Image: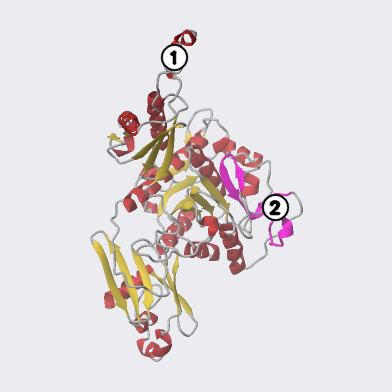
Amino acid sequence: MAYTFVRRAMSSSRLRGLPLPLLHAFPRRVLSSRAALKHEEMVLAALSKVMDRGSGDRSVRALGYLQGVETNESGTTVFVELPSPFHPHREALLENMRTRLSEVVGGGRGELKVSYSSSAPLPSAPEAGLSAPEVGPGLEGVGSIVAVYSCKGGVGKSTVATNLAFACAKRGLRVGLLDCDVYGPSLPTLVNPEDITVRRSKIGKMVMPIVHEGVKILSLGYVSPKSGVPGSGSATGSPVSPAVIRGPMASRVVTQLLKGTEWGELDVLLLDLPPGTGDVQLTICQEIVVRGAVAVTTPGELSKVDVLKGIEMFKTLNIPTLCAVENMAYFRNPATDEKHLLLGRSIQHEEMSLASESDLVRVPLSESVSSANDKGVPVSLSGSPVEEAQAYDRLADVLSARLFALDTSEAAKPKANPATEPLSTTTAGPRNFSLAFDANRAAFVVRKFLEDGASEKLIDPIVLRASNPKTGELMDAKRMALEGEALLNVRSVEAKGGYGYAVTWGNGGTIIYSLAAIEEVLKRS
């Protein structure tokens, strides 16, 4: 902000009674364009001295983070665009910038408006004018969805998911947490907000999540038992009927909780998935784009076998396991400070296909976590520097670093401009890949968006229909050829999360083809 002296506005006799600093405290109501330009250059010069440790100590101006300066009678606003909300030093970087800004314009006269250049939309960004899969208004403001999973019950997955959510929130991230276990919802036990009322949203028939300590949370256990949904209302203290429902019904309930909630603007939404590799997991991963996953296990061969199944399942769905937690990894003797491996040998990061040892966070077995769970106050919120809370802080750092790497690697890819002809019955799927059916050419069109441009290939409908939907291997082509006329009338092509595409054929049947299968068919085309 530029300031001006007030001597011409007041008589010298009136000025004599004012302290000297106040002579500069009256802002001009209007800045000339030249003065505004000079002032804005002063602001940019000051902020240019701020270095980003996460980018090799380069200046924030050289990195392009400073998008502009706006000055008016209210003060100075600096528009900042960081590469990702998961920047590892985001809070320290912004605080440094605020300090520099206040030195130039004075306390309370400067403001940073922060946006993110590569905060991934949900689902993946549509390319070349292709429309994105319908996720509903409740998820429109969610940047990333991360699944927390285990393939064995009793390993503490819900405890990990809950503490991870609050640890991420402490880092300034906008976080949501959805308890996806309709058979045994744990969140109402782990978190005890003062107000557990699930209120209706102003958007259609949607509901609002409960906000607790800065995290938006929801569970079937918070939903009123009057809703008629089996298993709802466990947090109300009233008698609760068990959720005796089949898998497809459970999937519909979870989908309703996910898409029927107005989550608002979130950097990350954590999904606490139920144990196993069943309907709920597959439905969620095919309905939306899950950017990554966190695996939870315990020491010992029995748990290791199951968690490796989960890793393989998510690989099949094209969802990377970003990091993992070995819960109850050891017990530390408070008297001797010695570690005891009560549950057996610790799992190694190589066994879980993790990039480094730092991607595997080990949380000790202790009374602190159990006591915190019983009280409904996660250990991450205890404020105590206990070893368990520190472990969850490390987990939040690791997850943020992996999501930051995804954001920056995707932002670095140039956007290609493929052919501009309209495509019918199509939705955009995973980044840099699209499948559509072109009725004019009576063929499927596969487009890949590469770093050096775009490529397009055609697939004969009969060939795709004759291929194994999981592997792409050729099956009975002669039998499929008899259905040729019906196959040419493809009704729709729909992206299924990051897994692949669902094709509804002319005869009404729908088959989901994995990306791996489509790639295999392309090799033969």
Q: Is residue 14 above or below residue 308?
A: above
Q: Residue at x 60, y 44 (%)?
A: 211
Question: Alpha-carbon neighbours of circle 1 within 10 Å: few (<14), some, or many (≥20)?
Answer: few
Provide the secondary structure element on which disc 2 rests: loop
Q: Which residue is mark 1?
A: 21
Can residue 503 be seen here? The reply is no
Q: Nearer the viewer, mark 2 or mark 1?
A: 1
Q: Hey, which quadrant is residue 424 in on the image?
A: bottom left
Q: Position of residue 183 (x, y in %)?
A: 63, 59
**Residue 355 located left or right of residue 367:** left
Per the rendered image, the range of residues in magenta is 210-236
Is 68 colored magenta in this rendering? no
The N terminus is located in which quarter? top left
Q: Residue at x 73, y 57 (%)?
A: 225
Q: Position of residue 195 (x, y in %)?
A: 68, 43
Q: Position of residue 423 (x, y in %)?
A: 37, 73
| Nearest the eye: 478 or 400 | 400
Provide the secondary structure element on which disc 1 rests: helix
Q: Position of residue 357 (x, y in %)?
A: 37, 44
Q: Mark 1 or mark 2, which is nearer the start of the sequence?
A: 1
Q: Outermost residue, right direction?
A: 239
Q: Which residue is mark 2?
A: 234
Q: Hey, which quadrant is residue 455 in on the image?
A: bottom left
Is 227 colored magenta in this rendering? yes
